[in-house]
Amino acid sequence: MRRSAPAAVAFGSNVGDRKRHIDEALARLRATPGVAVQASSSVRETEPVGGPPQGRFLNGVALLETTLGPEELLAALLAIERAGGRVRAAATRDAPRTIDLDLVFHGDAVRDTRDLTLPHPRAHERAFVLEPLSEVAPAWTHPRLRRTARELWDDWRREHPRR
C-alpha cells in the first residue's frame, strides 16, 4: 500500500459560468480514487497573467491527501480538465479556459521532467496561487526555496505593495 502524501492543486476558470466549472472540477477531484480533498480555499477574482486579452479569473487552491503518485495525480487532473471542456495545446497556452488545474506540490517531491515540474515552477511568483495556498497550507515549505507558503505570500505582498 502506497503512503499518503499531502498535495495542493491550484484551480481557476475564466470562461462561461466560472463558479460552476470550478464546482464541477472539485466534485470530480473529490470522486477520484486515492484523493481526499482536505480543504479548499476561498475563491477570489483575479486578473489574468499573460496570454491574449481575456476575462478575469476565479482562482483558489485545494489541499489534498492522496495515495496517487505525482504523475498519477497529474494524469487525473488533466482528465478532469478534459471532462470540463479544457483543451491544452501549445497554441492555446495562457488562453481563456473553462478550468485550469495545476499541481502546486506533492509532499516534498521535486521533479523536473518534460511533463511535470514540482513544485510548480511559477507558484511562488503568483498571488493567485500564494494567497489561497497560504490560507489552506500556510506551513507547507517549498523544498527548493526553503520558505513556507505564508512566508512566500508575505514576501510577495512586500514586493508588490499596491495589490
Image: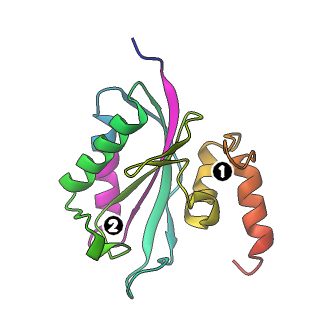
* Identity, as a three-letter code, of the amino acid under mark 2: Arg
The x, y position of residue 92, in whole percent, is 28, 74
Residue located 33% across and 76% down the image? 95
Looking at marks 2 and 1 on the same chain, the residue that comes earlier in the sequence is marked by 2
Numbered badge on residue 18? 2
Q: What span is in magenta?
A: 4-27
The x, y position of residue 38, in whole percent, is 49, 34
Q: From what the image shows, is residue 34 above or below residue 162?
A: above
Residue located 72% across and 56% down the image? 152
> In which quadrant of the rendered image does the C terminus lie?
bottom right
Q: From what the image shows, is residue 14 above or below residue 20?
A: below
The x, y position of residue 159, in whole percent, is 78, 73
Q: Please give left or right for residue 154 compared with residue 132 in the image.
A: right
Where residue 122 sits, quadrant-wise, is bottom right
* Helix, strand or loop for disc 1: helix
Disc nearest the viewer among 2 and 1:
1
Residue located 74% across and 81% down the image? 162
Q: Circle 1 is placed at which residue position?
A: 134
Numbered badge on residue 143? none
Res 15 seen here: no
**Mark 2 surroundings within 10 Å by alpha-carbon count, few (fewer than 14), some (14 through 19), many (20 or more):** some
* Identity, as a three-letter code, of the amino acid under mark 1: Ser
